[in-house]
Image (cartoon, rainbow, N blue to C red):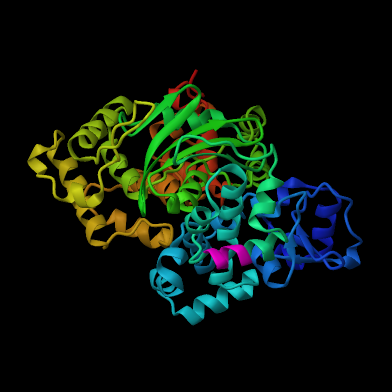
Amino acid sequence: MQRGMHHDTERCVRAVRSKDARFDGWFFTAVLTTRIYCRPSCPVVPPKPRNMTFYPSAAACQQAGFRACKRCRPDTSPGSPEWNLRADVTARAMRLIADGVVDREGVPGLAARLGYSTRQIERQLRAELGAGPLALARAQRAQTARLLIETTPLPMADVAFAAGFSSVRTFNDTVREVYALSPSELRSRAPGNRPTPSTPGTLSLRLPFRAPLNPDNLFGHLAATAVPGVEEWRDGAYRRTLRLPHGHGIVALTPRPDHIACRLSLGDPRDLTVAISRCRRLLDLDADPVAVDDALRADPQLAPLVDKAPGRRVPRTVDEAEFAVRAVLGQQVSTAAARTHAARLVTAHGDPVDDPEGGLTHLFPSTGALAAVDPETLAMPRTRRTTLTTLVARLADGSVNLGVECDWAETRARLLGLPGFGPWTADVIAMRALGDPDAFLPTDLGIRRAAGGLGLPSTPAALTARAAAWRPWRAYAVQYLWATDDHPINFLPV
């Protein structure tokens, strides 16, 4: 895929005519005669090419005066995979907007996190996406509002504030403008009729993705490495606690053939947008598996692995600092030992939570709580203790930033400057916490064993040279190589 696909009219028209769902989220089709915008896979008869125009974002469509199609619901498309592939300022800004930063901190807060002026951020987003940060955040609020209207019985005033609107009037005006329906009309037309009351604070959602999606290594990895009290696999679902801006939450994620079933219990409904964004990031749901697999399939040694189980995702995290701590705890020990070390920290320093279903007891400790821990109480070798306490101190004082806005190369260099951090630890954090799709683990024992078994070079230097052909998808190549082993991380739990 190339940047700015909406400028390639011929290619966009072909995608619309073929109703190709792979392009959903890459661009949006606005119909000049009806003033409606759609996703490329919209099931209606395609309009004539002369009546189509193309935009890079739903926000740009809305700013141009188009309203969302009631058939294909373009605002529910998977997010553009560009924002997870790229590390430039536009991609970092989009990841922050998805994480709710504009709603919480405004455009000045967004700009400050990126190290730019508000004018520079406005100019760059408008140039590439056809809309500024406020319009992009507004489109996201509208999508969250529709989700709440159609899937919950919440009063409209509660929906407005949970979706991030500053007033009920703004909420009403935005919903009418974007969907050409009032909030009450939108609820009455909801699929499956009106939402029925559920447990207070609990929402059931469908998280879309681009097919194919292989759940085996994705959920297998999360379940096999689950920290007791924070995560568990139960009744076919991965469950975990979430630390969110306004409180905490508990999520249950279940793989389905055409979506991920998501059940969220939130202490504060204002955290809904952030919780959804983090769950999508955890499961890598905005990836473009066709582009990834086509690139890796070009290598004759990898092709059989891709053909056998296409659509592998990179299991990521809902909390970058938490993952970094767990990566240090897992240095040179088994998966079971790493879970034991993490469980001790959770029991001693995590915030307790109530789980109506039982099983989950704590939030993973914050970096502030871990920074205050007496190092002598940590049951681990002294060198690893130094590595852990140094990392936690740097995370707590902000000198190491693992947030979605961070620069991947700069952050990796900072991590490598910490005591006890070698390439494996820095790269696994880059892959799973930072979300770098090109992170690679040539020193990993499992990767070297898999490479040798496939006839690939098994020494780190030679394997890195060979893996240059897999760029920019080396993190996905790691998943296919790991899958040659019979480790529990590669299998969907029974």
Q: Residue at x 56, y 75 (%)?
A: 124
Secondary structure character of the magenta stretch overall = helix
Furthest-top residue in this view: 494
Q: Quadrant of residue 459?
A: top left
Segment tinted magenta in the rendering: 168-173
Residue 121 location, x and y as percent? Answer: 51, 75
In the rendered image, the vertical position of residue 101 relative to residue 17, given as above or below: below
Q: Nearer the viewer, residue 294 or 249?
A: 249
Q: Residue at x 46, y 35 (%)?
A: 199
Q: Nearer the viewer, residue 208 or 490?
A: 208
Q: Residue at x 23, y 32 (%)?
A: 341
Residue 214 magenta-highlighted = no
Residue 222 location, x and y as percent? Answer: 43, 32
Residue 171 magenta-highlighted = yes
Count the marks. Answer: 0
Q: Residue at x 61, y 34 (%)?
A: 301
Q: Nearer the viewer, residue 328 or 141?
A: 141
Residue 432 location, x and y as percent? Answer: 43, 45
In this image, 425 relative to 451: left or right? left
Give the quadrant of the N terminus. bottom right
Q: Nearer the viewer, residue 87 or 236?
A: 236
In this image, 253 relative to 386: left or right? right
Camera sees residue 451 = no
In the rendered image, the vertical position of residue 272 relative to residue 357, given as above or below: below
Camera sees residue 233 = yes
Q: Quadrant of residue 194?
A: top right
Residue 198 location, x and y as percent? Answer: 51, 35
